Amino acid sequence: MDLTLTEKHRALRDEVLAFIEKYRGVAPSPGGGRKRPDAKVLEWQKLLLEHGYFARSIAREYGGFGAPQDLIEQAIIADAFSRAGVSPGIHNQGISMLVPTLLEVGTEEQKRRWVGPTIRGDIIWCQGYSEPGSGSDLAAAKTRAAVDDGHFVINGQKIWTSSAHYADMMFLLCRTEPEQSKHAGLSYLLVPMNTPGIEVRPLRTMTGRAEFNETFFTDVRVPVDQIVMSRGQGWHVANITLKYERLLLGDPNKLQQRLEAIRRMMTQPGPDGSRLLDRAEWRDRLLQLQGEVMAGRHHNLRLLSEQAEGVDSGLGRLIVKYHGTMLGHRLASLALDVLGSAGLHYEPQGETGEDDTATTWQIDYMYDIGLIIGGGSSNIQKNIIGERGLGLPREPKAAVPAGGN
Ligand SMILES: Cc1cc2nc3c(=O)[nH]c(=O)nc-3n(C[C@H](O)[C@H](O)[C@H](O)COP(=O)(O)OP(=O)(O)OC[C@H]3O[C@@H](n4cnc5c(N)ncnc54)[C@H](O)[C@@H]3O)c2cc1C
């Protein structure tokens, strides 16, 4: 794929930069995917959608901007926002994981009904995958959904459900065909969170905030047409969503934003007038991470170009989550060191509290340890990369205890 910018692309880049200059004063701070978008975030989202800087190639009938798919254009937009440190819009589980899944395998009715309100930020989704006893081994999910009178009746428990305490909807992986083998017995349902029988109990993380939850289902009824693909195809759909989740969690543009924010902090003169950036040991740490961020961004461009050519990136795609989440945590770690003693100060704020910049770095540092685990832990990613990507021998299965099943 030719990455030289055409005249049209250069014009777009200038247009985006002018937009950012004009509107950056009304932009919310970047991040914010961990709480319900407030009025300022929704207004910004609307502005981005109107200008085609968000959901650019999603069809108009589904609420997008309707431009032809042009991966270079998308890369130009993402690059301009991340370099400027300006919010590129909302990135949450609904927008970044469910929407592309529905666009790939949803029905026409599902796309029309869910994509528009989700990309506008009006509908918030949570992901009902993990259960006690089935996290890494996701296909072992036990939550049942039996069909009764045109409805799935769901019973069971999910855990670590991020955002369930304020989400409107859940995409849920559950067992509908218990007589089938583990992977063939699953289905993928869309469940309104206000359905009677759903109980959400918060779990507090080390940030002091309750960011994820236990979610219990007791005779929860959802119409049978609230399924994506058909019964028994849930494992296939869940893996499509996981593909997008891994790209979201390792997003190189987010890493670029972090790097720029740290660089700005390091160019601020301290009390004695000196700048950290002028000190070799600090500059060295920044440059090492900058090199890795650049490698991640170029890798992303390679993936984009393979996608444009219809090539399956395989191993290339798998390393994004592993590399990106580990690097994100190291960037947050550098930021805390740059903050010095201020980096040690942390007072947990409520879910709705406005975070100041310093506190945000502390949260990122703590929360990012979770991202190394969430969406498939780094250990599991390494197994997948080794076995499926590099063709190494499969790891031996744990022995089944006598009398076990
Ligand atoms: C911040 C955060 C947000 C999350 N949000 C959600 C969400 O919104 N929805 C949702 O459904 N889930 C969510 N999760 C759950 C997440 O997907 C699981 O935690 C993850 O898949 C690991 O599963 P587990 O916690 O059951 O750990 P386990 O599977 O019990 O693993 C425990 C440890 O053993 C290691 N391990 C397990 N099997 C192997 C193996 N075969 N080889 C090598 N090592 C292995 C793992 O790497 C891990 O270190 C979230 C988790 C976190 C931390």
Image (cartoon, rainbow, N blue to C red):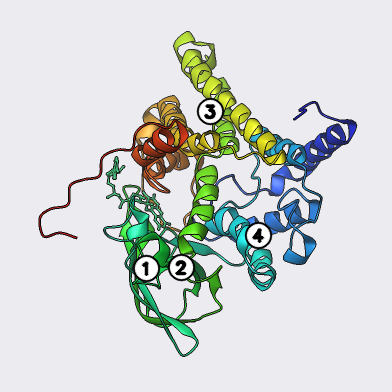
Callout 4 secondary element: helix
Task: State whether label 2 is within 8 Å of ligand 1.
Answer: no
Q: Toward the viewer: 239 or 266? A: 239
Q: Which numbered circle lies on residue 232?
A: 2
Q: In the drawing, what numbered circle is on residue 262? A: 3
Q: Give the CA distance from mark 4 to mark 3.
A: 36 Å
The disc, 2 or 1, on the residue closer to the chain's N-terminal end is 1
Q: Circle 2 sits in a helix, a strand or a loop, which is it?
A: loop
Relative horizontal placement of residue 140, taking residue 244 as reference (left or right): left
Three-letter code for the amino acid on which mark 3 is drawn? Ile
Mark 2 or 4: the one toward you: 2
Of circles 2 and 1, which is in front? 1
| Residue at the bottom extreme of this rendering | 149
Precedes in sequence: disc 3 or disc 2: 2
| Residue 325 x/y as whole percent | 45, 37
Q: Nearer the viewer, mark 4 or mark 1?
A: 1
Q: Residue at x 40, y 68 (%)?
A: 174
Answer yes or no: do the residues labelled 2 and 1 have beta carbons within 8 Å? Answer: yes
Q: Amino acid at mark 2?
A: Gly
Q: Mark 3 or 2, which is nearer the eye?
A: 2
Q: Earlier in the sequence, mark 4 or mark 3?
A: 4
**Which amino acid type is marked by label 4?**
Leu
Residue 103 circle label = 4
